[in-house]
Amino acid sequence: MNAETGSPTALIVDDDVGFILWLGEMVTASGYQAIPALECRQALTLVKKLALRIDVLVVNPQLRGAARAMKVLASEHPRLRVVLIRDPAAPGPVPDSTHATLERPSAWEPISRPQWVVKVRKVLLRPSAVK
């Protein structure tokens, strides 16, 4: 929870600037403070330098250092919830069911802001644990 605003804080880590900004709007509309980062190392530096308390980590698991970032942040924030960004068009394994997932919308998918706010809010509130 952010001490200044009283809002829970979500750290969003993905290498797509447009997606981070868009998702940040959805997260903010869901009652969270959104903190963006383009890579995992940058995310860890932000948390440390700004002494941020993170409630939810929204991360693309395919980013370099994602597993380490989840582990480090979970050790520093015991109640951390993790949401994995899943890109259905990208090759690679499907994230395990330990964590909540948020599927990245495709370019052709019509995006309704109110529907996405509800979807994001539901995913942000789903408990998960880093093992």
Image: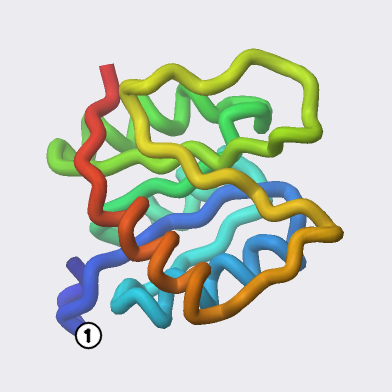
Observer-nearest of 91 and 119:
119
Q: Where the N terminus falls, by quadrant?
A: bottom left
Q: Position of residue 91 (x, y in %)?
A: 78, 21
- Residue at image position (64%, 63%) is 20
Q: Name which quarter of the figure residue 33 lies in.
A: bottom left
Relative horizontal placement of residue 26, taking residue 81 as reference (left or right): right
Mark 1: which amino acid? Thr
Q: Specify whether residue 123 is in view.
A: yes
Q: Secondary structure at mark 1?
A: loop
- Residue at image position (51%, 46%) is 102
Q: Is residue 28 above or below residue 87?
A: below
Q: Where the C terminus falls, by quadrant?
A: top left
Q: Position of residue 89 (x, y in %)?
A: 80, 34
- Residue at image position (66%, 27%) is 62
Q: Which residue is mark 1?
A: 5
| Residue projecting furthest to the right | 108
Relative horizontal placement of residue 5, taking residue 101 as reference (left or right): left
Observer-nearest of 123 and 12:
123
Q: Is residue 8 above or below residue 71?
A: below
Q: How is the image coloured?
A: rainbow
Circle 1 packing at 10 Å, graded few (<14), some (14-19), many (20+), is few
Q: Is residue 65 above or below residue 12?
A: above
Q: Specify whether residue 50 is in view.
A: no
Numbered label tally: 1
Q: Position of residue 80 (x, y in %)?
A: 23, 42
- Residue at image position (35%, 39%) is 82
Q: Position of residue 44 (x, y in %)?
A: 46, 44
